Image (cartoon, rainbow, N blue to C red):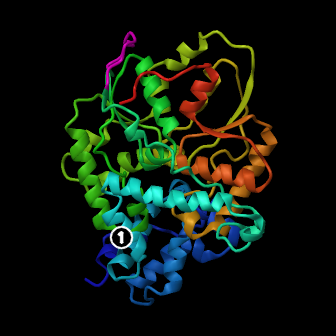
């Protein structure tokens, strides 16, 4: 079979009725008005490939790469076409024919499955990030990701890794809450481990405060999102098999995630390639904020005595949390329950910010355009803080705000809990 990966999603491709519902809210289409950058256009072209009327040209590959994986087209589709699966399998087909990125393939296969290698790779990138940040003004015009003389906001890969901070198992000293959940495993994700360790520490602190024992397996690896969205089937399968093996060995009631993309991948995409054990694994995956609300912690926070200050907070919905997991009311419920916090809803809170992992690296000018819309929505709220539940969103929104002259801090949900509850110090969860 010439196009086996594409043939395997033929049924999904043929479900498209070309109604154009997918165009509304699609950032790439609304920014370009190019039919080939809408889901309908891409599916039409892929159908032509299957029928032998078109080949996988470089132009088609470029169009397929111009996707934020925001899931807007999938949720808008009246015939429930699984557009994300179609695009991923199309990229798998391209990779099999040797048309994918060699560098990305090497990273997916030889770096992501190995935490020590990934950490070393991140530290090397951190050297570039440091040099980039301290580069003199006269050099900015020659640097990448610096249009208009404004440098991109980059992660701090020189911070201490979360896996070097937390213990593998931490029992809680607090009175347990009345719940069936008494022991959880924490899936941190790569960015939280490598650059946003304070978020991970806060997650564990609050779980311990609830009387929940926390297991943080040090042999967990990348969730596989970059490989999946990049179409590297073999690399994704290897990461899936490893993580399911690691977490299925743990006797835990839930697998907690603080990264929207990780949670969505673990919950919904592992089933595409995993064996019989995937149901046991995926049924336990839950977002951190979702878990807190499910356990009634928002009622507990309401009883906390308010301090002497008030902060205005707005919230950005990560695509993979709202459209991927259906989690959007819980973060708002949690924020509204916090003392000292005033919640302001921004316009288009669920519109993709443009981060989307590798997309913002390969297509930074377009990512800036999408980020500008998000920055404008945030500015109108006059909020003191922007809260979100995805490290990629957190980084890209911070970059967008900086690029357009705004200094509003962007923080994670667990960090907001620390701020609002006026916590001091860190619980003894270090190794």
Q: Is residue 45 left or right of residue 375?
A: left
Q: How many marks?
A: 1
Position in image of residue 187 (x %, y %):
37, 40
Which span is picked out in magenta? Answer: 170-180
Q: Secondary structure at mark 1?
A: helix
Q: Is residue 407 above or below residue 419?
A: below
Q: Where's the C terminus, which quadrant? A: top left
Which sits in the foreground, 283 or 193? 193
Which sits in the foreground, 13 or 28? 28
Q: Where's the N terminus, which quadrant? A: bottom left
User: In terms of image quadrants, where is residue 129?
Assistant: bottom right
- Residue 175 is one of the magenta-drawn residues: yes
Q: Is residue 274 above or below residue 178?
A: below
Q: Main secondary structure of the magenta part?
A: loop
Tell me what residue is drawn at x 47 percent, y 44 percent: 192
On the question of residue 152 being in view, the answer is no
Position in image of residue 346 (x %, y %):
72, 41
Q: Is residue 1 left or right of residue 380?
A: left
- Residue 263 is one of the magenta-drawn residues: no
Tell me what residue is drawn at x 75 percent, y 19 percent: 309
- Pointer 1: what residue? 106
Q: Is residue 173 left or right of residue 280?
A: right
Tell me what residue is drawn at x 29 percent, y 85 percent: 2
């Amino acid at each position: 079979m010439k196009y086996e990966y594409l043939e395997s999603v033929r049924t999904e491709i043929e479900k498209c009725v070309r109604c154009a519902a997918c165009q509304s809210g699609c950032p790439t289409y609304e920014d370009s008005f190019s039919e080939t950058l809408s889901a309908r256009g891409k599916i039409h072209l892929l159908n032509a490939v299957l029928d032998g009327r078109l080949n996988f040209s470089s132009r088609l590959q470029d169009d397929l790469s111009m996707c934020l994986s925001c899931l807007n087209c999938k949720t808008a589709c009246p015939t429930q076409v699984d557009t994300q699966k179609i695009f991923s399998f199309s990229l798998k087909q391209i990779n099999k024919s040797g048309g994918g990125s060699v560098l990305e393939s090497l990273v997916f296969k030889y770096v992501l499955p190995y935490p020590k290698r990934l950490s070393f790779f991140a530290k090397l990138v951190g050297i570039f990030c440091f040099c980039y940040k301290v580069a003199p003004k006269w050099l900015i015009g020659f640097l990448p990701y610096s249009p208009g003389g404004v440098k991109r906001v980059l992660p701090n890969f020189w911070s201490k890794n979360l896996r070097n901070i937390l213990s593998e198992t931490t029992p809680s000293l607090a009175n347990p809450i009345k719940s069936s959940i008494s022991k959880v495993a924490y899936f941190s994700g790569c960015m939280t481990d490598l650059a946003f360790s304070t978020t991970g520490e806060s997650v564990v602190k609050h779980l311990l405060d609830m009387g929940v024992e926390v297991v943080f397996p040090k042999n967990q690896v990348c969730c596989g999102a970059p490989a999946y969205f990049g179409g590297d089937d073999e690399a994704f399968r290897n990461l899936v098999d490893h993580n399911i093996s690691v977490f299925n060995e743990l006797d835990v009631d839930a697998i907690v995630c603080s990264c929207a993309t990780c949670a969505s991948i673990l919950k919904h995409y592992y089933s595409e390639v995993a064996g019989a054990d995937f149901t046991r694994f995926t049924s336990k995956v839950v977002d951190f904020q979702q878990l807190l609300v499910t356990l009634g912690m928002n009622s507990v926070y309401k009883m906390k005595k308010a301090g002497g200050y008030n902060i205005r907070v707005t919230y950005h919905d990560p695509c993979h949390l709202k459209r991927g997991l259906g989690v959007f009311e819980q973060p708002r419920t949690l924020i509204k329950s916090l003392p000292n916090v005033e919640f302001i809803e921004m316009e288009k809170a669920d519109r993709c910010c443009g981060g989307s992992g590798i997309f913002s690296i390969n297509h930074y000018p377009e990512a800036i355009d999408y980020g500008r819309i998000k920055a404008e929505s945030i500015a109108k709220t006059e909020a003191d803080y922007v809260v979100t539940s995805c490290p990629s969103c957190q980084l890209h929104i911070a970059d967008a705000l900086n690029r357009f002259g705004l200094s509003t801090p962007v923080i994670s949900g667990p960090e907001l809990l620390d701020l609002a509850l006026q916590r001091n110090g860190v619980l003894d969860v270090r190794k």
